[in-house]
Image: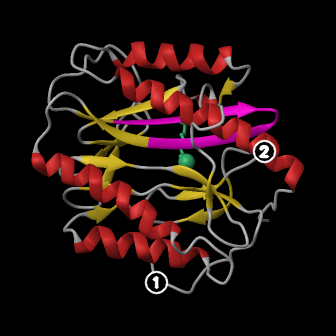
């Protein structure tokens, strides 16, 4: 069942999403050579708690941290720890916050110091693919119209979209229906309706789309060892333009 949020619920959802977006921005500002991934995790954790919210990911199915920090060939679910960021890394940071009963979920990939032109292109194409996708995030379209637009844009730029992880509905639960794949034919899946809130999150690989999960059960890396980037926002379907909820304005 796809949950439609009413205006009262959306007030809370917006607040949760603003906290989440501010946490992403804070994390992004910390990305520079010499900083450990666990220092970013701690700062984000403390920020979310200071806002009166809870980190959505901490203990989610046993996940041991407040953010996912996925460096270079790590696609998603990198666990913060002793790794020290170095010049040239690309750093995907995914964060969720629970506030007044609702989750926000967002991610972005940040450059650490000076990165290669290819890495920058991967980051830019990944972010733009999200915007290509949300052009279809409105009534009159179906979920897979978003998926198809993302895939088409990514592949036309010579990159590939991850298949084995997808976007999702988000609200009282971190993961709700529907699934929002970043690939597929247009015109399939549920019809989009006002009041749906979706986490749209292209995961884009420089090489093949295949991924592999390491023995820790979380860390997901590209099968070919090439770079990967991620971009995600929580988006509200309205009667007109979609509203990106994970924005920092108005916090
Ligand atoms: N942010 C991820 C998503 O977009 C979920 C992270 S799973 C967790 O769906 F276990 F790390 F929390
Ligand atoms: Co998500």
Residue 172 tag number: 2
According to the picture, the residue beneath numbered tag 1 turns out to be: 185
Rendered location of residue 24, percent (x, y)? 49, 32
Quadrant where the N terminus sits is bottom right
Q: Residue furthest front?
A: 250
Rendered location of residue 213, percent (x, y)? 37, 43
> Magenta segment: does it hold 96?
yes
Q: Which residues are magenta?
A: 92-107
Classify 30 as above or below 246. Answer: above
Q: Is residue 112 visible?
A: yes
Residue 126 tag number: none
Task: Examine the image and state in which quarter residue 179 appears.
Answer: bottom right
Rendered location of residue 75, percent (x, y)? 34, 45
Rendered location of residue 21, percent (x, y)? 55, 36
Quadrant where the C terminus sits is top right
User: As rendered, which of 94 and 7 lies closer to the eye?
Assistant: 7
Principal secondary structure, stretch drawn in magenta: strand
């Amino acid at each position: 069942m796809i949950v439609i949020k009413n205006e009262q619920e959306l007030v809370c959802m917006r607040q949760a999403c603003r906290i989440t977006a501010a946490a992403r921005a804070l994390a992004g500002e910390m990305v520079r050579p010499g900083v450990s991934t666990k220092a970013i995790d701690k700062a984000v954790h403390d920020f979310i708690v200071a806002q009166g919210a809870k980190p959505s990911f901490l203990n989610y199915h046993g996940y041991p941290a407040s953010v996912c920090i996925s460096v270079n060939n790590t696609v998603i679910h990198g666990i913060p720890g002793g790794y020290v960021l170095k010049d040239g890394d690309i750093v995907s940071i995914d964060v969720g916050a629970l506030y007044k009963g609702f989750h926000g979920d967002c991610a972005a990939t940040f450059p650490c110091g000076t990165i290669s032109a290819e890495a920058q292109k991967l980051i830019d194409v990944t972010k733009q693919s999200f915007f290509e996708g949300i052009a279809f995030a409105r009534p009159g379209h179906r979920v897979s119209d978003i998926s198809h637009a993302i895939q088409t844009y990514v592949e036309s730029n010579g990159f590939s979209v991850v298949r084995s992880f997808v976007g999702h509905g988000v609200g009282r639960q971190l993961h709700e229906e529907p699934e929002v794949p970043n690939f597929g034919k247009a015109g399939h899946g549920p019809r989009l309706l006002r009041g749906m809130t979706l986490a749209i999150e292209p995961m884009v690989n420089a090489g093949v789309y295949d991924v592999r999960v390491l023995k820790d059960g979380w860390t997901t890396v590209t099968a070919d060892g090439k770079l990967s980037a991620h971009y995600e926002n929580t988006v509200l379907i309205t009667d007109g333009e979609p509203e990106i909820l994970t924005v920092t304005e108005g916090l």
